[in-house]
Amino acid sequence: MMIEQPLDYDDVSDHARLQKKLKTPICLDESIKTVAIAREAIGAGACRIINIKPGRVGGFGESIRLHDLCASCDIPVWHGGMLESGIGRAANIHLSTLPNFTLPGDVAASRRYFDPDLIDPPIEIGPDGTIGVPPGPGIGVAIREDRVARATLKHAVLEAAHA
Ligand SMILES: [Mg+2]
């Protein structure tokens, strides 16, 4: 249904040339670091699908702006997972509920990669292959502070500058 990132990350023009020759949609992943690059890639016809990873584009604000741009251009998106802990994974699930995330995403169960994960209870995949949106306030999962402390390598306190 798609070919993901067949060429170099900085090669929008050749992706555009290739996409024009293919019936199969090209999905850009590594190329899309910002909304501005996505606008350029879509305008050039370099892709028909985009993969959104918050860790690649600089966070959830840019992810939402990217989602909105793609929605306005009829470019469906899907959520690409990286190796987030359960905390990032929960936030990813919430992001994936936006309406233009119409393709199956990469978000997996939280205990698949970390033992133990930083949240409890873990995020589980249901028997139908879907993951429920964590209920409750915030990102909807309980963070195990003891596990965060055990996994912490470095600690810093940042103070706001006084005007
Ligand atoms: Mg990829």
Image (spheres, rainbow, N blue to C red):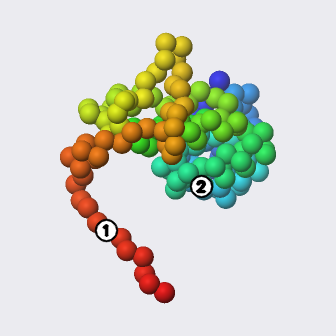
Secondary structure under the numbered disc 2 in the rendered image: helix
Q: Secondary structure at mark 1?
A: loop
Quarter of the picture containing the N terminus is top right
53 versus 25 height, above or below: below
Q: Position of residue 50 (x, y in %)?
A: 64, 40
Q: Which mark is residue 157?
A: 1
The numbered mark, 1 or 2, whose residue comes first in the sequence reads 2
Q: What residue is shown with label 2? A: 61
Q: Estimate how packed mark 2 is, as few (under 14), some (14 to 19) or many (20 or more) residues with alpha carbons within 10 Å.
A: few
Residue 40, position in %: x, y?
Answer: 71, 55
- Amino acid under label 2? Gly
Task: Give the x, y percent position of residue 126.
Answer: 49, 17
Q: Is mark 1 within 8 Å of ligand 1?
A: no
Q: Which numbered tag is attached to residue 17?
A: none
Name above or below for residue 40 compared with residue 121: below
**Residue found farthest to the top:** 127
Q: Evaluate whether residue 92 shows in this view.
A: no
Question: Please, what is the three-letter code of the amino acid marked with disc 1?
Answer: Val
The residue under the point 37% across, 30% down is 121
Residue at x 52%, y 43% (from the top left corner):
137
| Of the pair 86 and 55, the residue shown nearer to us | 86
- Closest to the observer, 59 or 51: 59
Q: Is residue 119 left or right of residue 43?
A: left
Q: Are marks 1 and 2 in contact (CB under 8 Å)?
A: no
Residues packed near mark 1 inside 10 Å, few (<14), some (14 to 19) or many (20 plus): few
